[in-house]
Image (cartoon, rainbow, N blue to C red):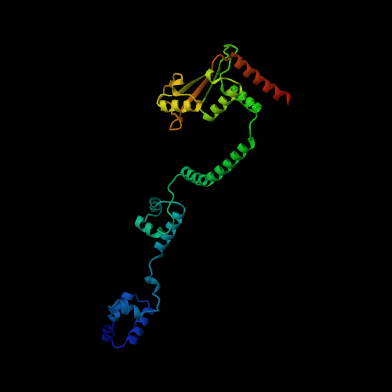
Amino acid sequence: MTSELNRYADFESLREQAVSLRREGLSLRQIRDRLKIFNNDLLQRLVKGEPPPAWTKRPRAKDDLRDRARELRLQGMTYDQIQVELGCSKSSISLWVRDLPKVDRRTPTEQGREAARKRWAHERPLREAARTAAVREATTAVGELSARELFIAGVALYWAEGSKSKPHRRDESVTFINSDPDVIRVYLAWLDLLGIARSRLRFRVMIHESADVGGAERYWADLAGIPPSDLQKTTLKKHNPKTVRKNTGANYRGCLVVRVSTASDLYRRIEGSWYGIVGAVASAG
């Protein structure tokens, strides 16, 4: 820089000339050519503090395009859509709007699903906690079960899930089938309450042929308190390839069929007890 200053008689004199030319409306290029100063740093120092003439500023057309591009981007338009709208290059659009949020290209339906997913992700633990608390409270409220309460519960359970005689087909057998191990436990406890000897019970598994048949047999035999060899022949249900099964996985064990032998007297007792419950409800209002 010192060598540059030495090439000119006086910096202040050059600055006065440069400022004067600047105020006359000359551009930096014109001042450079007029004063023969080809050092850009020195040239900038000579005109420091003097605003450039208005005519040297870039046209407002690009500014208008930039503002419009940003407006369209905020409305959710893509680069391609803005390009069609404004007729400018995507590289320019990218430069103008790069600080704005990216456009969500998903459909309204997809956006709605995502919003619902996020909402449920927040609400599900709260609802599950409330559900768990309500179930725990109800479980505690039951307390100990009297023989009468178990008897009535068992009658209702059997009449809902067990086999029943029809007027057109008299069949007073007692057969119960269910896939819920807890339901089976309550049913077996009810039979014990009625004094039905376990030797009168016949157990059979019903399950899809594609499942773990052996594992299911062992599971149900253990729950019933008998060796697997005491189970009757398992009923295998054939799989329909057109049907989408949901009862699959490690916890699928089919159903257990529990039949009581020589049970006509028991069936009549169950039927009469059920009608007794219905009559009591009717009498109560």
Residue 206 rendering spot, x and y as whole percentages: 46, 22
Question: Which residue is painted at 38% across and 71% down in the image?
Answer: 55
- Quadrant of the image occupied by residue 101: bottom left
| Closer to the camera in the image, 55 or 258 | 258
The residue sitting at 57% across, 26% down in the picture is: 189
Which residue is the extreme one toward the bottom?
9
Q: Nearer the viewer, residue 123 or 86?
A: 123
Check the picture and name the quadrant holding the N terminus: bottom left
For the question of whether residue 89 can be seen, the reply is: no
In the picture, residue 233 is in which quadrant? top left
Q: In this view, does 37 lie above or below 240?
A: below
Where is residue 120 shown, x and y percent of the image? 52, 44
Q: Is residue 156 visible?
A: yes
Front residue of 231/126: it is: 231
Q: In the rendered view of the protein, which quadrant contains the C terminus?
A: top right
Describe residue 259's horizontal placement relative to residue 38 as left or right. Answer: right
Q: 28 or 231, which is in the foreground?
A: 231
Question: On the rendered structure, is 94 left or right of 269?
Answer: left
Return the x and y of residue 140 as percentages of the image width and height. Answer: 62, 38
Count the labels in the image. Answer: 0
Residue 118 vertical position relative to residue 173 in the rendered view, above or below: below
